[in-house]
Image (cartoon, rainbow, N blue to C red):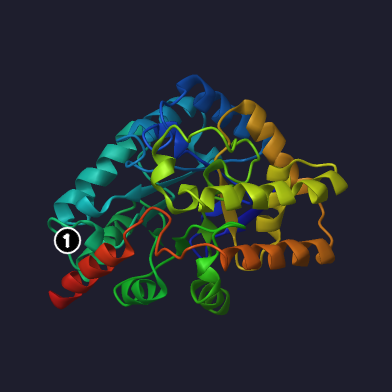
Amino acid sequence: MKHYELGNTGVKVTEIIQGLWEAGGGHFGVPNDDATIEAVHACLEVGIDTFDTAVRYGSGHSEEMLGKALKGVNRSEYVLIAKAWPTHYSKEGMEEGINTSLKLMNTDYLDVYFLHYPTYWNTENPVSMQEAMENICDLKKRGKIRSVGVSNFCLEELKQAQGYGQIDVIQPGYNLLWRYIDRDILPYCIETNMPIISYSCLAQGLLTGTHLREKKVPDNRSNTALFIDGTYEKCLDFTDSLIPMAQKYNCTVPQLVIRWMLDTKGITAPLVGSSNRKQVLENVKAIDLVLSKEDYDLLDARSKEFGESIPEYELNFNLNPTALSEARKAFELTQ
């Protein structure tokens, strides 16, 4: 298992990071706590020592389960990544948010702490980008976090945040079905050596081959861009098209998808949300898979073609881009 350092922070993450969004429930329905804990233990067994969570995932439930799973494990043997929600970007809110996360995960520091979304996502009482950055950077100065990141920021917002403090890593959504960062963020990060920890590697399950056409998605995923009627079916068609290549390499479709992510220039490490022990043991095999350049390029081309065939949204979780754009503009007028 390879490790990659995030800039000059001293924080080293594994080439596959275990994502615990599903562990919180909510967006993914009712969580399976036993499976979550078993998956974390399996990760440690195979060398995955980096875990990504957020207080937003199940109102802290994901963080709590991760803390339970890691109880008794030496703190130096794993890396914790978490995120502050926009309502916690004020000085008092940032302190409350970090202390809550630290308590839930039974630790006194985090290795990476992200601003989960741009400041204007707090539509009630947003703080400025400057204030949010000053507050999160203060946590780093005081040793509560080791590195600072931003998630779901466009390039303009990333550059704005960099004007107020050091950004050590970013976390955008990225997979074979969702590649908007190719336009500007990915080239910018490659040029500036900015690490990228990407999320939704398997597109919330769409790239696993487990979703059925006739089965209604039972949770909040049905309200996201790739799961809307018409697009959902196209995603399943794309996943089905991967089966022959997976068979060629004697691997599963998820393994093929993860290997493509690992081979993509600019991606430091993808989050892979393995739900249980079996999935961890299967997905980690992607590390040993070797794709030919021809097949990587073929997947890459098919992926880009697919992206051009579906409706465009600013974020996978925002089906009303006009409303979000208006919120951003209104906020910018106050700065």
Tell me: residue 313, above or below residue 47. below
**Residue 22, how many percent across, how many down?**
46, 36
In the figure, is residue 47 to the left or right of 31? right
On the question of residue 135 being in view, the answer is: no
Q: Classify residue 53 by image quadrant.
A: top left
Q: Is residue 108 visible?
A: yes
Q: Which residue is mark 1?
A: 126
Amino acid type at circle 1 is: Pro
Q: Is residue 330 left or right of residue 294?
A: left
Name the residue at 35% across, 40% down.
108
Q: Residue at (83%, 66%) from the top-left corner?
A: 294
Graded by Cα atoms within 10 Å as few (under 14), some (14 to 19) or many (20 or more), the crowding at tag 1 reads: some
Give the image location of residue 256, x and y in percent. Answer: 73, 49
Q: Quadrant of residue 300?
A: bottom right
> Residue 163 or 39: which is nearer the viewer?
39
> In the image, is 251 to the left or to the right of 136?
right
Q: Quadrant of the C terminus?
A: bottom left
Q: What residue is shown at x 66% (from left), y 27% (from top)?
A: 278
> Outermost residue toward the top?
34
Front residue of 129/27: it is 27
> SS for tag 1?
loop
x 59%, y 60%: residue: 268
Where is residue 210, by image quadrant?
top right
**In the image, is residue 177 above or below residue 34?**
below
